[in-house]
Image: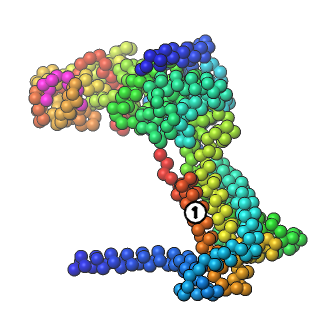
Amino acid sequence: MSSLAAERQPRLASQVAADTTGGDVAVELRDVTKTFGQVHALKEATLCVRRGELMTLLGPSGCGKSTLLNLIAGFLAPDRGELEIDGHRVNDTPPYKREIGMVFQNYALFPHMSAADNVGYGLRMRRLAKQEVGRRVADALALVRLSGIEERRPHQLSGGQQQRVALARALVISPKVLLLDEPLSALDRSLRASMQVEIKEIQRQLGVTTLFVTHDQGEALSLSDRIAVMFDGQIHQIGSPAEIYRRPKDRLVASFVGDVNVLRARLGSIDRTTATISLGGQSIPVASEPLAGCKPGDRADLFVRPEQLHLSETGELVAAQGTVTTHIYQGGHVDLYLLSPVAAGGRLLVRSSEPDAITRWPVGAAVGVTVSGADALAFPPQDDKP
Amino acid sequence: MSRSRQRALHVAGTLVVLAILGFVVLPALVVTIAAFNDKAILAFPPQAWSWRWFAKALAYPDFHSGFGNGLIVTGWASSIALLVGGAFAFALDRYAFAYKRTIEAILLSSLIVPHFTIGLGFLILAAQIGLARGFAVVVVCHVVLVLPFVLKSVYVSLRNLDRRLELAAAGLGASPSRVLITVTLPLLLPGLAGGWLLAAILSFNEFTASLFVTAQRTQTLPVAMYNYVREYADPSLAALSVIYIAATATLLIVANAYLGLGKLLNVEPRR
């Protein structure tokens, strides 16, 4: 980054900070419901976005996350419920008065304007003086490290450059909230990873409250201060990436975020805070809350992350037996797939960081599997598999 | 065996395509050649060559007034059609309302009603309400005739417009009217200009309905040409046709270079 850009950025950051007037809640939704005909896109969603945080809305396509974003932007109106930005009710405020910066999935750059005119559009709509517009556009383009392409039209820019222009266009108006609708999904993998880092850095630097929609759980885990996981129009869980990953509230969240093994087991004992799950020769402690109402001896599904499973020789006191079917070498670790009758899907995934895992556990080897760590979770069984 | 058969099919196919292409350009070709005939008859092929019919056609007063009248009628008719058709296209694309399909069908109906019926209808109406056969009747008649084409071309442009661009503008602080002026209209401009041009060409060339609604004072160029050929059979008309074709082709080539007319005829796939 040029020294000039570095000089200018604190000013952009201070502009954002100056706009923040008391209270630490930037966006609040209370019981917001939206239906399209017969489809309930959003069911009584309640959500608080803290000032300055980066929150992701994570969920499969059709879960209502984009609807939620469009409601905040004002492109859709809620059927019921309250919507507040900076403590003011905005249910009836049109989008152009909401001071929102939005980056669309396809970027939605104006094809008939140059990159600089795209970025300056919001400032011109605010009737800023021409010189001021030029200065702020240059600042914003420097912020996204994109100086020198001012006069190019969007179709003359690469996907990554278009992405940056779209980001600069949204940020230059010092929005109260930055909304990003799957902004990285059109980029290739390596570019996506570097843009994730850059978005996070820019967001930190400006301290702008950000809502980021994605269906990519890896993206959500690596970017977010907090994640709201959505399924079928409902927010299932809101928490930090570690909370979501280690303490998923229900089966859906546990299955959607990160890889997980589901093992058929039985409940050994249960009290107010903890329960134990009996699986093979092991007794595994879990939180009792998700198992409320279950009795010792009932069937229960144990959810275990691949890195919490360990391979051992058969004959030890193990949780399950299996046969190695596939190795996937991942550089830093090896993914081993095992056939095991205990697994809900018939297969187990074990993530081993031992460098000799492939030679030690060759394909066809019969192995024992043990569960370690305090992060195992159990849920009552359900008929349809997660 | 199969190879020789394939080859025979290939040759036959090429011949059929060439024949079809030939028939498409044949009339224009024959007229063009006839225009250069030195003799005062519309004969083919000519015996001797000359430019003199071009000079005569350009000097003929009825053609002059026909050209001027045509410009007046075309200018008004395609501009009015653009306003009316554009507004309806906008409404059809953006709003849901009762009898939407019926209204669309009525607006497009002049595609299936013969032009002489429309011309005759306006002639009777004009006579009934005692309207003199002035430009107003001709212009209104032409608006009805070209409306479907303008409507379609603007509608297609609207369908091709990514609505997220308008949302993006609104999100950046543009009120609805400023979204229209700064984003929607500039992006629709090729469609609007193309629709206007298409209407203008159709209106300027329209003959059947014009024959009914024009008078001596208001006759357009095609009507003047028809009246000419009823009296004379020299190649002036052929010469005029060549000018016509050349002018229209030039206009279209220029328009295509600036507007990309290909876009007007298709709904582009959405990204």
Nearer to the camera, A48 or B88:
B88
Vertical relation: B117 (above or below) A238: below
Local crowd at mark 1 within 10 Å, few (<14), some, or many (≥20)? few
Q: In the rendered image, is residue A189 in sight?
A: yes
Position in image of residue A311 (x %, y %):
16, 25
Nearer to the camera, B1 or A179:
B1
Nearer to the camera, A137 or A223:
A137
Position in image of residue B86 (x %, y %):
68, 53
Residue appearing at x 55%, y 85% in the figure: B48
Residue appearing at x 49%, y 26% in the figure: A141
Q: Which residue is mark 1?
A: B250
Nearer to the camera, A264 or B257:
B257
Residue appearing at x 76%, y 67% in the figure: B69
User: In the rendered view of the protein, which quadrant contains the N terminus of chain B?
Assistant: bottom left
| Relative side of B177 to B262, left or right | right
Position in image of residue A157 (x %, y %):
45, 38
Assign a secondary structure to mark 1. Answer: helix
Which residues are drawn in magenta? A349-358
Q: Residue placed farthest to the top in the image? A: A22
A354 part of magenta stretch = yes
Q: Of the residues shown, which amino acid type is indicated by label 1?
A: Thr
- Could you say which quadrant of the image residue B163 lies in? top right
Vertical relation: A276 (above or below) A193: above
Vertical relation: B221 (above or below) A348: below
Position in image of residue A288 (x %, y %):
36, 18
Residue appearing at x 83%, y 71% in the figure: B133
